[in-house]
């Protein structure tokens, strides 16, 4: 007989959205069980090795207070425990990696540590149970209610978990599939969404590429060349149609929709000044630098000898896997393995054949850093997923809601039921598994409508990650970490509010008084629901 455990709110998935959802619910007095399949909380930020992608106003606006506090605690952790040079220690906007993709490029283990510190008081009080390395196996339903989820814990025991509200904060919307909640995946057709940039046909398996990231350092004068990977010959010559004739393992990328042609460059351990790095995607240009793009430890931020090398994360166009989808297909396990094979082949290519600025080839001194990744080989625990299953929502966010080219200077759609805000530099769509080279577009600063968090049918399951009611296109901006944080916080707060008021999420949205009360609750908790129109982009 299965052991049953209960809480007010069950959250499956401990990534960015799951963590913020738990925090929001706990701060509102609720009990929570938080289930995470990997050894680490943090999702994109940690087990997937993706430093936070943020907009250029993030230090002052366009994020919830809880996210701002989280970022500040990350910086305080470095000031307390790492040997920073005085200038870095005094920098209020400390960026340990000085990566130009993010103003908080940091080691994933620091992020994991801070997340656990923020949750520890609730664990100590008995109101939170965190289950790591626990896998959801099945879900049971009664009509439009999800009644329980079975999980296998790290010791192999199967538990039955129940709660009045269940949140799907998994990286791929796994619970939507397990509980038979209506969802979409891949690309929609223009007839379905009315989006100007949508294709004429739909394809549930045409998804943005996934990337198996890894952490890298360089030891000059040493040889750390790995054995030639078994599939290296294939990947070395691979010219998928999405790349418009270019090799996957190469620094050249052809121009495509809203993108110029580029020749990436790699200068390992450059003598750059980490205090002069401009964190702004718009500076990418035609010859972007890869080494400090997603660097998480810049050696010059630390006292001499603390780091023999910078440490950078390889999440580059060269390991965006476009061979097929990593879920939704019988071939998904094959593509899952191939995604990692591509990244291993990229490492070997960088060590042996990649063109250097001095005219030579390869950097044999490159090696992975397992002490950073929590894995034996220095690769991420799981791939970086850019797309998930997405609920069929009461309100679907579409391209024309916030794409600058289709807003006639009016800014993004203002939703009466807004529960958060977000922004990114692009409507960022990488090359897809269906042959599309990707796309872009400039987003207006946008809002998150409550209707995108409410399934059309199921009453007590809420999405709390990338699985909200977006489209293949709009997901390109709503999938980023600060937005996922706000989505999770809104979902956790909504579940707590519904329990307190004994109403359904759909009723909260449709009843003006309840909606106003819920939005007021969010604001009291530090959520930002509207953009200041005076902020200029």
Image: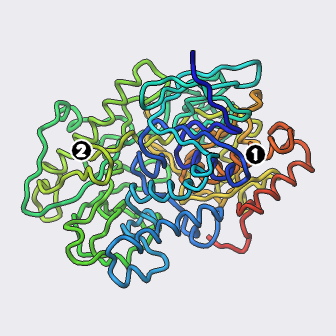
What percent of the width, then of the height, locates residue 243? Answer: 35, 41
Quadrant in which residue 470 is drawn: top right
Q: Disc 2 vs disc 1: Cβ atoms closer than 8 Å?
A: no
Residue visible at 14% across and 49% down in the picture: 353
Residue 247 visible at all:
no
Quarter of the image where the N terminus is located:
top right
What percent of the width, then of the height, locates residue 158? Answer: 51, 23
What percent of the width, then of the height, locates residue 31? Answer: 68, 43
Left or right: 377 with respect to 420? left
What percent of the width, then of the height, locates residue 134? Answer: 48, 33
Q: Toward the viewer: 237 or 321?
A: 321
Within 10 Å of disc 1 (Cα), the crowding (few <14, some 14-19, many 20+) is many
Tell me the number on the disc at residue 496.
1
Q: Earlier in the sequence, mark 2 or mark 1?
A: 2
Quadrant in which residue 535 is drawn: bottom right
Within 10 Å of disc 2 (Cα), the crowding (few <14, some 14-19, many 20+) is many
Q: Residue furthest front?
A: 125
Residue visible at 76% across and 18% down in the picture: 143
Query: Spatial distance from mark 2 to mark 1, Cα to Cα?
Result: 46 Å
Q: Toward the viewer: 461 or 322?
A: 461
At mark 2, the secondary structure is helix
Q: Is residue 479 above or below residue 6?
A: below
- The residue identified by callout 2 is 346
Left or right: 510 with respect to 462? right
Residue 10 visible at all:
yes
Quarter of the image where the C terminus is located:
bottom right
Q: How many marks?
A: 2
Residue visible at 47% across and 27% down in the picture: 327
Residue visible at 81% across and 42% down in the picture: 498
């Amino acid at each position: 007989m299965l052991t049953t455990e209960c809480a007010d709110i069950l959250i499956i998935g401990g990534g960015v959205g799951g963590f913020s959802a738990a925090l929001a619910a706990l701060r509102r007095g609720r009990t929570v069980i938080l289930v995470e399949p990997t050894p680490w909380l943090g999702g994109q930020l940690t087990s997937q090795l993706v430093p936070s992608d943020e907009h250029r106003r993030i230090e002052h606006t366009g994020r919830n207070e809880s996210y701002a506090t989280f970022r500040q605690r990350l910086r305080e952790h470095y000031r307390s425990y790492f040997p920073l040079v005085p200038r870095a220690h005094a920098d209020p906007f400390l960026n340990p990696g000085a990566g130009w993709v993010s103003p908080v490029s940091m080691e994933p283990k620091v992020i994991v540590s801070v997340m656990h510190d923020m949750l520890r008081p609730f664990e100590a009080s008995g109101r939170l149970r965190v289950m790591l390395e626990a896998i959801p196996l099945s879900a049971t339903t009664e009509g439009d209610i999800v009644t329980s989820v079975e999980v296998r814990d790290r010791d192999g025991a199967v538990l039955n978990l129940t709660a009045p509200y269940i949140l799907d904060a998994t990286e791929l919307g796994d619970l939507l599939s397990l509980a038979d909640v209506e969802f979409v995946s891949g690309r929609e057709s223009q007839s379905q969404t009315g989006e100007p940039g949508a294709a004429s046909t739909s394809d549930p398996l045409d998804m943005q590429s996934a990337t198996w990231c890894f952490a890298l350092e360089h030891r000059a004068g040493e040889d750390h060349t790995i054995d030639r990977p078994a599939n290296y010959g294939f990947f070395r010559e691979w010219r998928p149609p999405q790349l418009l004739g270019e090799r996957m393992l190469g620094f050249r990328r052809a121009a495509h929709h809203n993108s110029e042609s580029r020749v990436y460059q790699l200068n390992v351990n450059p003598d750059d000044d980490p205090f002069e790095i401009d964190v702004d995607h718009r500076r990418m240009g035609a010859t972007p630098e890869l080494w400090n793009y997603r660097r998480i430890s810049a050696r010059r931020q630390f006292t001499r000898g603390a780091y023999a090398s910078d440490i950078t994360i390889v999440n580059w166009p060269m390991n965006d896997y476009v061979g097929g989808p990593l879920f939704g297909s019988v071939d998904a396990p094959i593509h899952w393995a191939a995604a990692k094979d591509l990244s291993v082949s990229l490492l070997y290519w960088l060590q042996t054949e990649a063109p250097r600025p001095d005219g030579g080839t390869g950097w044999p001194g490159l090696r992975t850093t397992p002490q950073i990744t929590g894995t034996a080989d220095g690769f991420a625990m799981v791939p970086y997923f850019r797309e998930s299953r997405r609920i069929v929502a009461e309100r679907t966010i579409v391209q024309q809601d916030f794409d600058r080219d289709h807003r006639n200077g009016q800014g993004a759609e203002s939703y009466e039921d807004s529960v958060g805000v977000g922004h990114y530099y692009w409507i960022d769509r990488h090359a897809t598994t269906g042959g599309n080279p990707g796309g872009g577009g400039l987003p207006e600063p946008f809002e998150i409508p409550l209707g995108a968090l409410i399934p059309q049918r199921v009453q007590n399951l809420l999405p709390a990650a990338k699985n909200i009611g977006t489209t293949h296109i709009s997901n390109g901006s709503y999938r980023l970490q600060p937005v996922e944080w706000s989505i999770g916080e809104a979902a956790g707060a909504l579940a707590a509010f519904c329990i307190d008021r004994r109403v359904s999420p759909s009723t909260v949205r449709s009843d003006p008084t309840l909606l106003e009360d819920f939005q007021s609750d969010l604001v009291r908790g530090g959520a930002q629901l509207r953009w200041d129109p005076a902020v200029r982009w």
